Amino acid sequence: MKKTALVTGASAGIGKATAIYLAQNGYYVYGAARRLEKMQDLIPYGIKPMSLDVTNEESLKACVSQIISEVGCIDILVNSAGLGSYGALEDVPMQEARNLIDINLFGTARLIQLVLPQMRENKFGKIVNLSSVGGKVYFPMGSWYHASKHAIEGLSDCLRVEVKQFGIDVIVIEPGATKSEMIEIGAADLMRVSGNTPYQNLAKSIAKTYSSMNAVEPIVIAKLIKKGIEAKQPKARYVGGDMVRPILFMRRILSDKMFDKMILSQMK
């Protein structure tokens, strides 16, 4: 029997690639995002696009309710919806910061709350939370993004232990730089926020770094997600992308001061 997957953030990037890849491999997929018009190309793959705003309670409830009424269950939840907002902490308006946390953390958490009762009843479920290498390390000008991804790591660890007793697995995916709208607009967003402030020199250096990133195709991460949800005993975390493992290794072995120096050495 086909498993049903709900993939958020399916209008672009990792979310879209994951929705397509799962559909191509025998899953019945609902692709959800705010921009319904950006998901019409999913229909030929047998994917059902759904309008979803993860910051809106009624939208979240309606999405889950519709899927359960149509197919009876949500076996797999892939929380791929996310936002990157960049700039020095001093410069980022709190409204923008709250919006990022609302999307990256609270939207993920609320959707998990809504699917868990049915997963517990079925004694089966796979919850995939998209974190980032930025959930383990840090880079200047990304304070709110890193805060949200560090929070996803902690949330997922607690949740994994809580729901294991019900036959539900929680899997964290930690991609490195991945080709997406977030990468494309990251440098421009950074310069908008901090390009004309006392942090402008650092902002220019980091924007240059963004433009030279060796980002992987989203399908690389989609394959990682499929590997995780199909493993009999999935790992707590799956890592993918260019230079991610070396970066995580350096974070483990270096002191905070040494890691700071390593980061700053790249911002010239």
Image: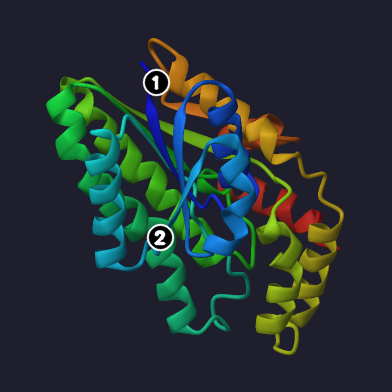
Quarter of the rendering occupied by the N terminus:
top left
Marking on residue 73: none
Give how far across and how far down residue 249 sits, in percent. Answer: 63, 30
- Residue at 64% in and 64% down: 140
Q: Secondary structure at mark 2?
A: loop
Q: Amino acid at mark 2?
A: Leu
Report the number of discs: 2
Q: Are marks 2 and 1 in contact (CB under 8 Å)?
A: no
Give how far across and how far down residue 129 sits, in percent. Answer: 43, 41
Marking on residue 52: 2
Neighbourhood count class around disc 2 (C-alpha, 10 Å): few under 14, some 14–19, many 20 upward = many
- Residue at 37% in and 30% down: 4
Direction from residue 76 to residue 207 in the image, left or right: right
Name the N-terminal-most of marks 2 and 1.
Answer: 1
Viewer-nearest of discs 2 and 1: 1
Q: Amino acid at mark 1?
A: Lys
Direction from residue 133 to residue 171 in the image, left or right: left
**Separation (CA) of disc 2 from disc 1:** 23 Å
Give how far across and how far down residue 265 sits, in percent. Answer: 80, 55
**Location of residue 176 by image quarter:** top right
Quarter of the rendering occupied by the C terminus:
bottom right
Asked if residue 187 is positioned above or below residue 257 in the image, the reply reads: below
Residue 255 visible from this viewpoint = no
Q: Which residue is mark 1?
A: 2
- Residue at 40% in and 64% down: 53
Give how far across and how far down residue 28 sits, in percent. Answer: 44, 30
- Residue at 48% in and 54% down: 81
Neighbourhood count class around disc 1 (C-alpha, 10 Å): few under 14, some 14–19, many 20 upward = few
Direction from residue 163 to residue 265 in the image, left or right: right
**Location of residue 11 by image quarter:** bottom right
Foreground: 162 or 203? 162
